[in-house]
């Protein structure tokens, strides 16, 4: 992250870039404002990223969640971030200079197919803010299917959604366990889902 990445001017720039991109492509962005710091931290905690060596983020936008993930992740870890919108890719490329951050300008449905080099067991967590409610059911299934395949057994998939239950039946098709965590500390109020597949017994 750049030295002033937490400063007021870069945060205002991030908010402005976010709003500008929402106005142009509201169906892809899905929210007027970036995720709040409090909710971003909660997502990092639900993902257990303080213990992780490899994390994937889906839809980083201007980096509101990215910043909190990197703040909590170990020094030796890596964060792969999948962002499709060119304006956000440009913004992240300029503002996130942390050497642990790897920007992938691809759709989230590529998360199981990206070359992660040394990581064989899969990601230790996947953190998503993809606006699934605005996507087709087919694309939603493809992203969730890829996420389930990209995680090591038992590792969590955490996602923020603005509808309290829309995504639940989709998640249940791809993950064995799901918990729901409502949060009013966001504009708009959000629901966090934490899902995982239980490792096979030996
Ligand atoms: C609600 S915004 C969240 C942005 C940021 N993570 C935050 O929480 O403030 C949704 C993000 O998902 C991205 N997105 C939408 N569809 C995507 C896809 N198929 N693959 C990767 N990113 C996608 C959008 O460009 C946008 O950055």
Image: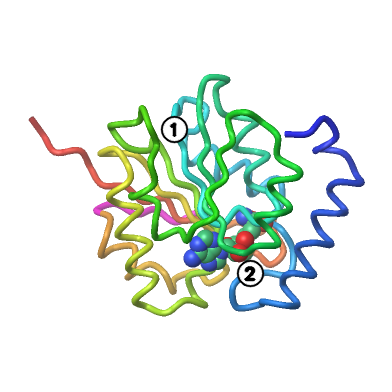
**87 relative position to 74: left or right:** right
Report the front residue among 169 and 105: 105
> What secondary structure is found at the residue carrying circle 2?
helix
Residue 202 or residue 113, whichever sits in front: 113
Tell whether circle 2 marks a residue whose Cβ is less than 8 angstroms from ligand 1. yes
Q: Quadrant of ligand 1?
A: bottom right
Left or right for 53, reference 148: right
Q: Answer whether residue 73 is visible to the viewer in this image.
A: yes
The residue under the point 49% across, 57% down is 106
Numbered tag placed on residue 54 in the rendering: 1
Q: Residue 156's quadrant in the figure? A: top left
Question: Which residue in the protein does label 2 denote?
Answer: 29
Question: Horizontally, is 156 left or right of 12 in the view?
Answer: left
Residue 77 is situated, as x and y percent measured from the top left of the image, at: 50, 26
Q: Give the vertical position of 92 relative to 164 (above or below).
A: above
The structure residue drawn at horizontal position 71% and vertical position 54%, both measured from the top left corner, is 90
């Amino acid at each position: 992250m750049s030295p002033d990445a937490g400063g007021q001017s870069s945060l205002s720039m991030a908010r402005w870039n976010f709003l500008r991109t929402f106005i142009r492509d509201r169906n892809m962005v899905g929210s007027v404002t970036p995720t709040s710091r409090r909710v971003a931290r909660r997502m990092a905690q639900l993902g257990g990223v303080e213990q992780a060596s490899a994390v994937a983020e889906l839809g980083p936008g201007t980096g509101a969640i990215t910043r909190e993930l990197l703040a909590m992740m170990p020094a030796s870890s890596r964060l792969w971030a999948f962002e499709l919108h060119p304006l956000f890719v440009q913004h992240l490329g300029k503002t996130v200079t942390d050497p642990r951050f790897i920007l992938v300008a691809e759709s989230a449905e590529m998360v199981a197919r990206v070359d992660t080099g040394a990581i064989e067991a899969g990601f230790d967590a996947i953190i998503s803010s993809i606006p699934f409610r605005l996507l087709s059911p087919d694309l939603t299934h493809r992203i969730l299917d890829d996420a389930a395949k990209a995680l090591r057994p038992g590792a969590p998939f955490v996602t923020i959604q603005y509808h309290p239950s829309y995504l639940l039946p989709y998640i249940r098709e791809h993950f064995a366990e799901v918990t729901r965590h409502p949060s009013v500390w966001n504009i708009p109020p959000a629901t966090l889902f934490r899902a995982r597949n239980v490792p096979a017994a030996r």
